[in-house]
Image (cartoon, rainbow, N blue to C red):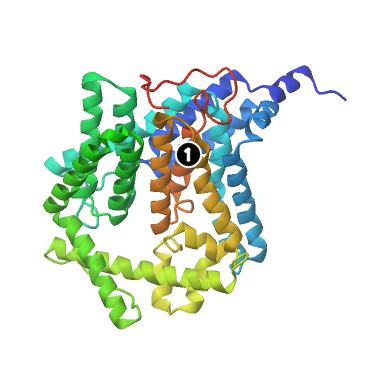
Amino acid sequence: MAAPLGVRAWRDQPLPGPQSAARWSLVAMAFSLPISGLATDALSAVLVLLWLAAGGWSERWRQLRHDRLVAVSMALLLLIAAGISWSAAPPELAARGLARYTRLLIVPIAVSLLVAQPLWQRRVLLAFLAAMALTLVLVLAHLVHPFWLPAELGGHMVFKHYIIQSVFLSLFVLGALVIARWHASGAVRWGWYAAALLGAIIVLGVEPSRTGFIALGLVALVFLFQAPAPAHRLRWGVALIALLAVTVAMSSGMRSRVQGTIDFLIDANGSGHAQVPDVQPGPDPLEYQRQKAAASGGIRMMLWEQAAAMARERPLLGWGTGSFRVEFCRRLDADWCRLLKTSSSQPHSQFLFFAAELGVAGLALFVVLVAVPYATVRRWPPWARCPVAGTTAVFVVHSLFDSTLYLGVEGFTYPLLMSALIAVRPAGASGLAPGAPAPQDQPSSSPA
């Protein structure tokens, strides 16, 4: 029996009203990412409901069936779901682990809403940059007159944990540089360059996050090799090195964090084993930062060692979804187990997390997931390639030191940004459908 005409229309083409509302929900969600996890969760639920209500399944299938990012993200999610069947964890822990990764569903949703929609793509990306600009302004205001509870390390945390804030500010620096280089002119261009400089100074001189330091350094390197003409790269490189040298010389917090890491590595090599660190705040905030850095290094080293040991014991498919906490506590004493429960029950490395719980299969899919966006844009013009390359570099670094897809904010942010950045292909790029607008060497619109 044939479906009614209205049902066929809903099945074949998205309804304009719910489709538009879903896109605005995606924009609002991008703005909420650096600001409020509760708002992000609520907006993601609204987004899913509107996306489902819009229908258009035939159209969505045509959009998504050949998209590599969608294919890999869904394959990874299916493997995570299958991992429950061989998990060493109790069913409730395994189900909780799967629930964490359902944020990967943002990839097909975002791609279907943004593909061949440059205006909506720009709105999503600019919403994220606007939230980070707000964060930057509030950090600067906090430096002048503290109005917010200080971060645990004595920094100027506004909305998020200092590591997330620092890494996301690195992404803001990337976006500001891309806009200044390719999408603005005159005074507006120099305004964006000034915003990028302020963001870099905050990351290097105010936020004591080693992950943020590395992320910002990679952003600078990507921009250096993507943006200037080859004849000008030496000049840009000298300027970046000078900025880094001046900032390091002025940042006592940064030096304390780096010194703490060095102290830990020396102590670990000498002792050959790690103990549960006990660091209490003291009268000297810089000494506290140094001790916290050493303690943080010790915790992560133990987590990485145990995750690597789990991966070696079951290399093919790992211990199953949600099993890391159970296996970690089985191998170590109660003090370490209690510490893990305060660390989100994850090994602070997404690469090792997948290797431990899902073996080579999970690790390989994650590596492909990270690589697909840049593989997609490697033949695109520099103005479209640079933001993808920079975001990929930050994603990799952040994933080396934290479980980015497992955690709430990062689990939405990176899949959404990657989906948005590659949703609209410039004319002449690999895989572009005919009829797209011609590329420009110096586009004057907002970032694509």
Say which element carries label 1: helix
For label 1, the crowd category at 10 Å Cα-Cα, with few meaning under 14, some 14 to 19 and many 20 or more, is many
The part of the image, by quadrant, that contains residue 32 is top left
| Viewer-side residue, 62 vs 408 | 62
Q: Is residue 156 visible?
A: no
Residue 406 lies, with reference to residue 91, above or below; the image says above
Residue tagged 1: 418
- Name the residue at the front extreme: 231
| Viewer-side residue, 447 vs 284 | 447
Residue 71 lies, with reference to residue 314, above or below; the image says above
Please report the residue visible at 30 percent of the width from the left and 28 percent of the height from the top. Answer: 181
Check the picture and name the quadrant holding the C terminus: top left
Left or right side of 142 for 42:
right
Check the picture and name the quadrant holding the N terminus: top right
- Name the residue at the right extreme: 1
In the rendering, at what x and y percent does residue 186 appear?
A: 23, 19
In the rendering, at what x and y percent does residue 408 appear?
A: 45, 49
The three-letter code of the residue at mark 1 reads Met
Residue 296 lies, with reference to residue 214, above or below; the image says below
Please report the residue visible at 44 percent of the width from the left and 42 percent of the height from the top. Answer: 413
Q: Is residue 181 visible?
A: yes
| Viewer-side residue, 238 vs 353 | 238
Left or right side of 234 for 75:
right
| Viewer-side residue, 374 vs 411 | 374
In the rendering, at what x and y percent does residue 443 appear?
A: 38, 21
Residue 439 lies, with reference to residue 178, above or below; the image says above
